[in-house]
Image (tube, coloured by chain):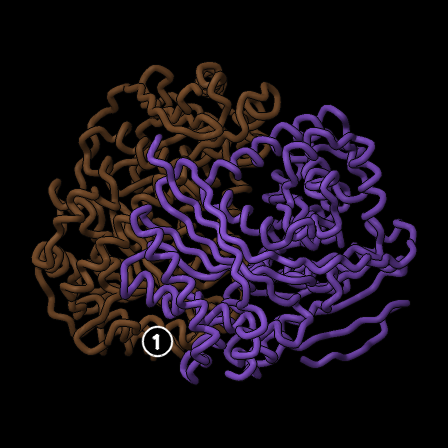
């Protein structure tokens, strides 16, 4: 689906999974109310959904600031700031997460992506109001202490080393560079070691003041809460922040892809192959068709690439496809783990499947199955409070809530001809970026 | 937890009402034993139109030997590759047609066939799970396909620095005890296992007395029991199975350095603790949380926050083990920091014995462990797993509620006793990256 599992780690730093779409529940159940959206006078958006399936509440702060908002010489700033927001505010000593969240049985973490940053907590429902207060506090009152800032450099540098130890993650990240060329989406969200080492408090503070403003914030609360009380808590905290007048620049469209082939020597037991194409951006009319296309190509046991390359031809250990729709552009990827001698043949077979999709399209059975899978995937992602909050917050931050709520209906109405046209439009077998990690010969 | 015995047909039905949580609707759990001895658990949860199923069998690497290592997982992976009625591909499309997922695998204490789907399709899903479990084709060609993939997974695991180092510390801790082997098995055993051995293993473990079916989601319990009876009732009753006791592992407490290509140095310090039925088990989990649970664990605060010596650090304890469970403190860092980081980890572990937990640490650790338990059980898939797992290993499906109460009752003296007893003789494995790339 539009936010990929597994591979999204390359983009969304610090988090293992990601959500995707939200639609009306086919049979509204008494324990779930529709989400309600409010816009406070200063521009903060507040989304509250009553969801009484467990005693846990999800409270999330979404910020319209991410890797793409950095200047070329400040790469890694958004992510660095995300770390520093856990280090204390003018009234909250460091260690507050431990006291206010973990100390009551909750969890809190954060993630930085190209288009946004978000802070997410899950905890016992009676803590909802206290958590809203805490998020409002860190959103503008973090002290960004010099000593902490220096200490955190070691941690972030380690995070970079760690991400290189995982080939799949590293492959996806590098493939963004190949596909997006010089566009900000090609940048590493973690930054570079060089820039991080030189980072100063002033630079960080300037980014914080500029981007962490009411107009950029969306607060999402999902759980067994009283919506009126929750809204009042948001008004009392986030509602008091002064409007800044800041308008974020819209992301520019990526330039068309320049075909590129990159081999990176990388010691390891297997080779990794990644092929990437530019896909439609999040608010494009083609996103549902591309979601289904990618699903039919390689997202389940019975989809085309695993059946052909893994089962019938025994060319790969694993193969899959994914589509990530970002605010200003999208990327479609096929990735595989395989024995190095199979690289060329696997690539040719992937292209053969792509060609077959472009020429013959998909069967009705395949289309029906992909639509049902999308519906089910949505139901499973909506099982937990934070899964729901993630869908709502993501849509509110980089898309539109109403579009998100109608998304599954759009998926249901896609025809097989639309899927074939999407394959013709986006999967050019001659123009793609190809990246391989190849173990050096021993 | 309240248990009420009711009678339903020929079998016993017990309803458990989970305690607490006035704000949310607490689903009911029903336990039913089929006449052939197989246990069925149903958790009726109306919140989301989804249903998850976990069919578990008491089998896994705990019962394997050096020569059969990985056989249970191998068998379960092969069971997904076609049945008496359908080829592998037909089987996969059958569950995908209903928006379902279906998977299987063997782990340490239990093996599982599991799936989830939209609520309206749960009966079809359950029938497919029964088909994979009761009528697997286990054809030679499909076994060979799976063998190739498993060998790839074993090779990948050895290629990833953390899992490679982690497997090494478990081997050093457990010696020949089966807990020292990964449930994937090893290259030699997976290369060697034959179709006949897989089929014999299947016949040995797929017996109603060692099977538990758990269903969680938008379902009605009477209907689930009826369908389960129809699908699984035809299995013949078997003799109750007895489990052999295993020799107690005796780690020598050695330190070992592994040199290989990696970006990060890994430092792992392991100990053996008690199994889940031991009275000190909750105290050991609290001890693990004070040291390595989240952002307030001593390792995180001291080594990552205060000294910037690590990106990742914490304590890994297995989800749940019936026998001696490992307790492994880990730390990943830049190669240049490895020596300081290792000394730091060992110092904190030593200090856990010398300096008792404060009242504040104890309260936080309890909240953390309880939180972890409830956070982990919020989806139907996890709920089904929990129910089936604790029932199949003999602890009882309501173990988590009893465990949560035991956690609440742990005292600082219990934690001190746990540290005194179990944090002795560390087994250390250090992965030192070589510079050559």
Q: What is chain B's hue in the picture? A: purple
**To which quarter of the image does residue B77 belong?**
top right
Question: Is B404 displayed left or right of B359 in the figure?
Answer: right
Question: Is A114 displayed left or right of B270 in the figure?
Answer: left
- Report the residue marked by disc 1: A100
Vertical placement of residue A242 versus B23, above or below? above
The answer to whether residue A36 is visible is no
x 55%, y 33%: residue: B155
x 67%, y 37%: residue: B94
The answer to whether residue B350 is visible is yes
Q: Residue A37: x, y in percent?
A: 31, 64
Vertical placement of residue A45 versus A316, above or below? below
Chain at tag 1: A
Callout 1: few (<14), some (14-19), or many (20+) C-alpha neighbours within 10 Å?
Answer: some
Q: Nearer the viewer, residue A423 or B34?
A: B34
Chain coloured brown in the rendered structure: A
> Quarter holding the C terminus of chain B?
top left
x 63%, y 71%: residue: B400
Q: Residue B260: x, y in percent?
A: 43, 37
Element at label 1: helix
x 36%, y 33%: residue: A171
Q: Residue A146: x, y in percent?
A: 14, 63
Q: Nearer the viewer, residue B366 or B9?
A: B366
> Quarter holding the N terminus of chain B?
bottom right
Vertical placement of residue A316 versus B93, above or below? above
């Amino acid at each position: 689906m539009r936010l990929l599992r597994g591979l999204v780690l390359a983009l969304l730093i610090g988090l293992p999974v990601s959500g995707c779409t939200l639609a009306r529940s086919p049979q509204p159940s008494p324990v779930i109310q529709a989400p309600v959206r409010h816009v406070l006078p200063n521009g903060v958006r507040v989304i509250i959904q009553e969801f009484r399936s467990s005693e846990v509440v999800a409270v999330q702060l979404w910020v319209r600031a991410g890797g793409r908002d950095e200047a070329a010489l400040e790469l890694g700033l958004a992510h660095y700031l995300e770390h520093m927001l856990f280090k204390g505010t003018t009234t909250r000593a460091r260690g507050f997460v431990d006291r206010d969240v973990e100390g009551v049985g909750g969890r809190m973490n954060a993630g930085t992506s190209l288009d946004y940053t978000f802070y997410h907590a899950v905890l016992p429902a009676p803590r909802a109001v206290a958590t809203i207060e805490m998020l409002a506090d860190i959103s503008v009152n973090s002290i960004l202490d010099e000593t902490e800032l220096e200490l955190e450099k070691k941690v972030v540098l380690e995070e970079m080393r760690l991400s290189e130890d995982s080939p799949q993650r590293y492959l996806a990240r590098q493939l963004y560079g190949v596909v997006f060329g010089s566009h900000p989406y090609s940048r590493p969200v973690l930054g570079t070691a060089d820039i991080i080492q030189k980072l100063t408090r002033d630079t960080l503070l300037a980014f914080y003041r500029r981007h962490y403003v009411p107009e950029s914030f969306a607060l999402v609360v999902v759980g067994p809460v009283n919506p009126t009380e929750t809204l009042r808590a948001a008004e009392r905290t986030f509602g008091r922040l002064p409007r800044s007048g800041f308008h974020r620049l819209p992301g520019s469209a990526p330039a068309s892809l320049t075909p590129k082939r990159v081999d990176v020597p990388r010691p390891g037991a297997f080779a990794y192959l990644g092929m990437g194409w530019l896909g439609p951006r999040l608010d494009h009319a083609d996103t549902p068709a591309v979601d289904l296309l990618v699903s039919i190509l390689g997202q389940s046991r019975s989809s085309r690439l695993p059946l052909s390359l893994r089962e019938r031809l025994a060319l790969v250990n694993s193969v899959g496809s994914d589509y990530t729709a970002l605010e200003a552009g999208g990327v479609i990827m096929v990735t595989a783990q395989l024995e190095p001698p199979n690289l060329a043949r696997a690539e040719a077979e992937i292209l053969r499947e792509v060609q077959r999709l472009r020429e013959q399209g998909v069967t009705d059975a395949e289309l029906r199955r992909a639509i049902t899978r999308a519906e089910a995937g949505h139901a499973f992602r909506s099982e937990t409070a934070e899964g729901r909050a993630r869908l709502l917050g993501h849509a509110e931050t980089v898309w539109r809530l109403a579009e998100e709520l109608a998304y599954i209906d759009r998926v249901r109405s896609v025809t097989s001809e639309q899927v074939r046209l999407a394959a013709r439009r986006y999967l050019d077998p001659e123009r793609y970026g190809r990246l391989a990690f190849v173990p050096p010969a021993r | 937890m309240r248990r009420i015995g009711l009678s339903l047909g020929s079998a016993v039905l017990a309803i458990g009402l989970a305690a607490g949580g006035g704000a949310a609707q607490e689903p009911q759990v029903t336990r039913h034993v089929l006449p052939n001895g197989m246990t069925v658990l149903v958790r009726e949860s109306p919140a989301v139109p989804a249903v998850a199923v976990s069919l578990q069998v008491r089998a896994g690497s705990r019962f394997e030997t050096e020569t059969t290592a990985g056989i249970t997982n191998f068998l379960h992976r092969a069971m997904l590759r076609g049945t008496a009625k359908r080829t592998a591909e037909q089987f996969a499309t059958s569950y995908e047609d209903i928006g379902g997922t279906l998977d299987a695998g063997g782990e340490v204490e239990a093996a599982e066939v599991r799936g989830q789907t939209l609520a309206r399709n749960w009966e079809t899903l359950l029938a497919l799970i029964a088909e994979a479990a009761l009528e697997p084709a286990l054809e030679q060609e499909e076994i060979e396909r799976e063998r190739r993939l498993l060998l790839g997974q074993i090779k990948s695991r050895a290629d990833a620095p953390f899992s490679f180092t982690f497997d090494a510390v478990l081997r050093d801790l457990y010696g020949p005890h089966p807990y020292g082997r990964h449930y994937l098995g090893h290259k030699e055993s997976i290369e060697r296992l034959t179709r006949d051995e897989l089929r014999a293993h299947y016949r040995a473990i797929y017996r109603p007395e060692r099977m538990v079916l758990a269903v969680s989601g938008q379902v009605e319990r009477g209907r689930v029991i009826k369908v389960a009876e129809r699908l699984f009732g035809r299995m013949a009753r078997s003799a109750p199975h007895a489990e052999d006791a295993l020799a107690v592992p005796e780690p020598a407490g050695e330190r070992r350095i592994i040199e290989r290509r990696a970006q990060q140095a890994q430092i792992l310090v392991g100990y053996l603790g008690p199994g889940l039925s031991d009275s000190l088990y909750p105290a050991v989990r609290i001890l693990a949380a004070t040291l390595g649970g989240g952002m307030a664990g001593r390792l995180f605060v001291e080594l990552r926050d205060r000294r910037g010596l690590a990106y990742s650090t914490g304590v890994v304890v297995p989800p749940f083990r019936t026998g001696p469970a490992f307790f492994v403190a880990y730390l990943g860092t830049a190669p240049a920091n490895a020596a300081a980081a290792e000394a730091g980890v060992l110092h904190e572990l030593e200090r856990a014995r010398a300096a008792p937990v404060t009242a504040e640490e104890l309260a936080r650790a309890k909240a953390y462990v309880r939180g972890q338990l409830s956070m982990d059980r919020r989806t139907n898939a996890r709920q089904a797993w929990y129910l089936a797992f604790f029932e199949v290993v003999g602890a009882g499906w309501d173990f988590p509620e009893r465990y949560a109460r035991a956690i609440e009752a742990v005292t600082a003296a219990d934690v001190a006793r746990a540290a005194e007893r179990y944090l002795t003789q560390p087994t250390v494995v250090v992965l030192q990256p070589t510079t050559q790339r």
